[in-house]
Amino acid sequence: MEIVTRAARLRAVLHGARSLGRSVGLVPTMGALHAGHASLIERAAAECDLVVVSIFVNPLQFGEATDLDRYPRTLDTDLEGARASGASVVFAPSVEEMWPGWPEPRATSLVVGGVGSLWEGASRPGHFDGVATVVAKLFALAGPCRAYFGEKDYQQLCVVRRLVADLSFEVEVVGCPIVRDADGLALSSRNVLLGAEDRRAALALPEILSAGQAALDEGEQEPAVVARRMAGALAPGSPVVLDYAAVVDAEDLHVPERLDTERPLRLLVAASVGAVRLIDNAPALSVGALVPSAAAGATSR
Ligand code: PAF
């Protein structure tokens, strides 16, 4: 496995591979690799001839300096993990290499609207602008490839799909399922920041998602009622502070007027546990999908 720190070298390695007819898989990460990342790298290795894992804690996507400072950095272990999962190249640039002149503001950055302005976009202004800017740069450096993103950051995946469509990158975006601990907590690099008690309390997030699915399973058709059921799953006195819990259209992430729809839905939740912000999500079966006659009835009314 080659460790590359220079953008020009990454371009040359990947261009060389493609000129020999080898396909390239890109797994963008901010390091602190866990089994969720391993699943992305393994899938990329199964589907592509050469896999590059980028490890870069992108300062552009953090609101508060403290959040950026606190973000776990474990490069040595990450290199081992990337190698064991099948990476051929790790791209681990410095901030200066990615953003020359940092911390001076860049002359060029992307601004994300639409699907990126809701939920995380509303709670963390500028976050998706920073994500889109760094992902666009990684795509520009990687060239034509398949790029693997976890559904854990479901809205990010939607933003990246739009980025590729809007700016015509020669990249096929592959979304990969969330990996969870045995007790249901979605794996996240931020989980290591949770103390034992907060780690237990964080299980409220998957419970909130289950409460949303239960409401849908019972035939609830009002998104606001489902959202209330989700919020109500939080035990009184829980240290978890809910930011949002909602059932949304899985593609545009808007709250649909009613849930008797054939369109795919997604349950979203975001909350803070102490100083740690966590997000989770799950695909949801709509009332329309569960009870076909409900959808038919709704359209004929
Ligand atoms: O999901 C992440 O780890 C980051 O947002 C990404 C896509 C690597 C961009 O910095």
Image (tube, rainbow, N blue to C red):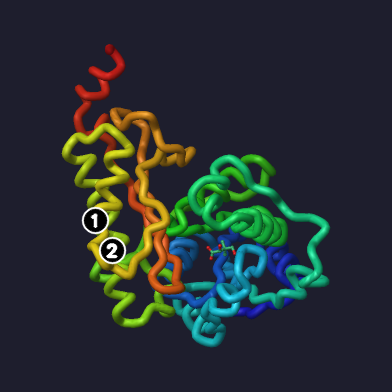
Q: Secondary structure at mark 1?
A: loop
Q: At x 53% / y 73%, what residue is drawn? A: 87
Q: At x 62% / y 43%, what residue is drawn? A: 113
Q: Position of residue 187 (x, y in %)?
A: 38, 69
Q: Where 177 falls versus 229 (above or below)?
A: below
Q: Tell me whether circle 2 and circle 1 mark residues in contact (CB < 8 Å).
A: yes
Q: Position of residue 150 (x, y in %)?
A: 45, 59
* Residue 256 visible to an observer of this rendering: yes
Image mark for residue 233: 1
Image mark for residue 6: none
* Residue 42 visible to an observer of this rendering: no
Q: Quadrant of residue 168?
A: top right
Q: Earlier in the sequence, mark 2 or mark 1?
A: 2
User: At label 2, which amino acid type do we have?
Assistant: Ala
Q: At x 52% / y 80%, what residue is drawn? A: 72
Residue closest to the eye, 82 or 189: 189
In the shown orientation, is residue 175 left or right of residue 100?
A: left
- Residue on which the image places disc 2: 204
Label 1 packing within 10 angstroms: few (<14), some (14-19), many (20+) = some
User: At label 1, which amino acid type do we have?
Assistant: Ala
Label 2 packing within 10 angstroms: few (<14), some (14-19), many (20+) = many
Quadrant of ligand 1 in image:
bottom right
Q: Position of residue 160 (x, y in %)?
A: 57, 50
Q: Position of residue 155 (x, y in %)?
A: 49, 51
Residue closest to the eye, 141 or 261: 261
Residue closest to the eye, 193 or 283: 193
